[in-house]
Image (spheres, rainbow, N blue to C red):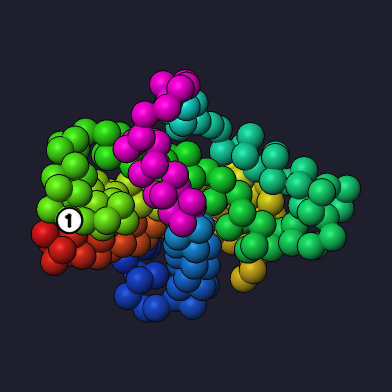
Amino acid sequence: MDFLSDGITRGLELLWRLDPEIYSIAWLSLRVSLTATLLAAAVAVPLGFVIGQREFPGKRLVVVFFNTMLALPTVVVGLLVYGLVSSQGALGQLQILYTPAAMVMAQTFLACPLITALVISAVGTLDQRVAPTARTLGATGWQAALAVFSEAHGAILAALAAGFGRVVTEVGAAIMVGGNIRHFTRTFTTAIALETSKGDFAQGMALGMILLVVALAVNLVSHQFHLRRA
C-alpha cells in the first residue's frame, strides 16, 4: 500500500511546484474533454428534448437504443473513429489521426448518447402540464419549449457533467486515435496507463489524484452555476 501514500504525496508535490508537464497534460485533457462535451451537447440536448417531449411511433425503441448506447465500449468508439480518420478511411484526407482533433471526435461520439439518454429521462419526468399551461397563457411554441427547458435546466446541467465525466476519464479511444504523444496528445488517463505499464505506480496514482481534483473542480463550477440559476 506504500504506492498509495507515495502517489498522494507525489501528486501534492507536482501540484505545489507547478510541474509544467502536469499542467500541460491537465490543459490538454480539459480542452479536449470540454470541447467534446460542448459539441455533443449541441446535438444531444435538442435531440433528447424533442424525444422526451414528443410522442411518435417507435419512441420506446429509440429510448431503448440510447439507453443501450450507454454501455458502448470506448475501444469500439476508438476503432470506429480510427477507421474514419485513418489514411484509408472516409475522412482520411483531413489527416487528423493522432491529433487532439481525432480525440475530440471520439469523445464527442462517446458523450452524445449519454447526454441524450439523460436529457430524455429528465424531460420525460417533468410535469406534462408545463407546456400546455404556457400555451394557454399566450406563449408561442418556442416560448413553451423554453419554459420546459427552464424547468429541466438542473437535470440538463447534470447530464452535461455526466458527459464530461464520461469522456475525461476514458482511455481506450484516446490512445487509439491520439497515440499518447508527449506534449501533444497525452492526457491524464493515457499518462496513467503509461506510468502504470512502466511500473511507476506512485506516479500513476499521483496523476489519478490530480485528475480527480480537476473533475471535482469542473463539477463544482457546474453546481455553482445551477445554484445561481435556481
The residue segment tinted magenta is 40-61
Q: Is residue 120 visible?
A: yes
Count of numbered tags: 1
Instruction: Between residue 163 and residue 66, name the one nearer to us.
Output: 66
Would residue 121 appear left or right of 20 to someone viewing this image? left
Secondary structure at numbered mark 1: loop
Would residue 28 appear left or right of 17 to someone viewing this image? right
Instruction: Between residue 22 and residue 100, name the one nearer to us.
Output: 100
Q: At 30% from the left edge and 52% from the top edge, which residue is drawn?
A: 141
Instruction: Between residue 147 and residue 179, name the one nearer to us.
Output: 147
Q: Residue placed farthest to the right in the image?
A: 88
Q: At 79% from the left edge and 54% from the top edge, which residue is drawn?
A: 91
Instruction: Between residue 170 and residue 1, name the one nearer to us.
Output: 170
The answer to whether 74 is drawn above or below residue 158 in the figure is above
Classify the position of the C terminus by image quarter: bottom left
Name the residue that disc number 1 marks.
138
Q: Quadrant of residue 166?
A: top left
Q: Is residue 171 visible?
A: no
| Residue 50 among those drawn in magenta | yes
The answer to whether 113 is drawn above or below residue 107 in the figure is above
Would residue 145 appear left or right of 113 to someone viewing this image? left
The answer to whether 165 is drawn above or below residue 100 in the figure is above
Q: At 82% from the left edge and 49% from the top edge, which residue is drawn?
A: 90
Q: Quadrant of residue 209?
A: bottom left
Q: Position of residue 213 (x, y in %)?
A: 31, 60
> Looking at numbered disc 1 in the image, what kind of residue is underneath it?
Gly
Q: Main secondary structure of the magenta part?
A: helix
Q: Position of residue 165 (x, y in %)?
A: 38, 49
Q: Position of residue 157 (x, y in %)?
A: 28, 53
